Image (spheres, helix red, strand yellow):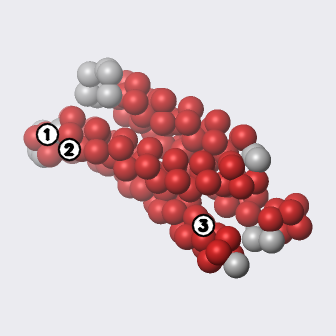
Amino acid sequence: MLQRAISPIRRRLDRVGIGLSGLCAIHCLASIVLVSGLGVGGEFFLSPDIHRYGLVVATLVAAVAIGWGALRHRMAAPFVIAMTGLTFMGGALAVPHGVKEAVLTIIGVALVSLGHILNMRHCHSAACKERCGD
């Protein structure tokens, strides 16, 4: 009974994770265009704090949603893919602002999104419904 109530929460967290990943990618691209092309918003868009906080939020959402799914469904792929993405995002914090940082971050958020998508797909699969009752 409790598991049936918790499942929609995890699915919502996967959707939130995908949305946050998309926002992060938009932020990276907008930063490059606005700061490089127009020279505006550098203090806000290139602030290291935004990237640090974003990585913390992404890690928490992925840990709960994907970690929960990995434990429940014994599926390693979404977890491994998302953690690889978080590693890329962490690596982006170690390079100077610019194209390298944006490329690492976009690769990272794409992998985290893919992890969330795979996690959600497994929840809707027949194998999951049979084994877990989700």
The percent coordinates of residue 113 (x first, y second) are: 55, 50
Q: CA distance from mark 1 to mark 2?
A: 5 Å
Q: Nearer the viewer, mark 3 or mark 2?
A: 3
As displayed, is residue 2 above or below residue 74?
Answer: below
Q: Are marks 1 and 2 in contact (CB under 8 Å)?
A: yes
Occupied quadrant, residue 84: top right
Q: In percent of the image, x 10 and y 41: which residue is there? A: 43
Indicate which disc residue 45 carries: 2
- Quickly name the residue at label 1: 42
Residue 84 visible from this viewpoint: yes
Front residue of 98/127: it is: 127
The percent coordinates of residue 78 (x first, y second) are: 67, 45
Secondary structure type for disc 1: helix
Which amino acid type is marked by label 3?
Arg
Judged left or right of residue 40, residue 88 is: right
On the rendered image, what quadrant is the N terminus found in? bottom right
Front residue of 26/74: it is: 74
Which amino acid type is marked by label 2?
Phe
Q: Nearer the viewer, mark 3 or mark 1?
A: 3
Judged left or right of residue 11, residue 30 is: left
- Quickly name the residue at label 3: 11
Front residue of 35/120: it is: 120
Q: Are marks 3 and 1 in contact (CB under 8 Å)?
A: no
Farthest residue, direction top: 95
Judged left or right of residue 3, residue 59 is: left
Disc with the residue nearer the chain's start (3 vs 1): 3
| Local crowd size for mark 1, using a 10 Å CA cut-off: few (<14), some (14–19), many (≥20) | some
As displayed, is residue 43 above or below residue 64?
Answer: above
